[in-house]
Image (spheres, rainbow, N blue to C red):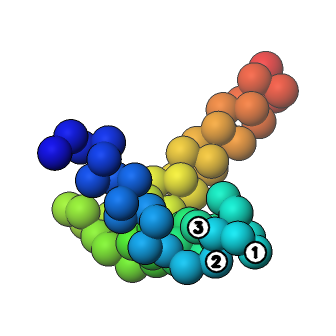
Amino acid sequence: MLVSERLKRLLRLVPGERRFGFYRFLPFFFVLGGAMEWFMIHVRIGKETFYDVYRRKQSERQYEARMEKGE
């Protein structure tokens, strides 16, 4: 059986096709987005999380902008 046939059969198992159409998959995407957000906030790789890196880079950009403005 081809992969596409298996995928079609799997997608048909999700309820709500007549009422919601393609939008019946929306709750899965909300859960996936929430899981990604939780992972980026709480899971440390090395010593920092994604948001630690983001905040550091943002403060570095602000510092560089102030230095350029002051010169």
Q: Residue 33's spot in the image, x, y percent?
A: 54, 67
Q: Residue 17's spot in the image, x, y percent?
A: 64, 69
Whether residue 50 is visible to the viewer of this picture, yes or no, is yes
* Position above or below: 6 against 42: above
At x 30%, y 47%, the residue is 5
Labels 2 and 1 touching (C-beta < 8 A): yes
Q: Which mark is residue 16?
A: 2
Task: Identify residue for label 3.
Answer: 25
| Residue 46 placement: quadrant | bottom left
| Residue 26 placement: quadrant | bottom right
Task: Identify residue for label 1.
Answer: 19
Q: CA distance from mark 2 to mark 1?
A: 5 Å
| Residue 53 placement: quadrant | bottom left
Question: Looking at numbered disc 2 in the image, what kind of residue is underneath it?
Answer: Gly
Locate residue 48 relative to residue 38 in the image: left or right. Answer: left
Nearest to the observer: residue 26 or residue 36: 26
Which residue in the rendered view is the most extreme toward the right?
69
At x 35%, y 64%, the residue is 10
Q: CA distance from mark 1 to mark 3?
A: 12 Å
At x 24%, y 63%, the residue is 45
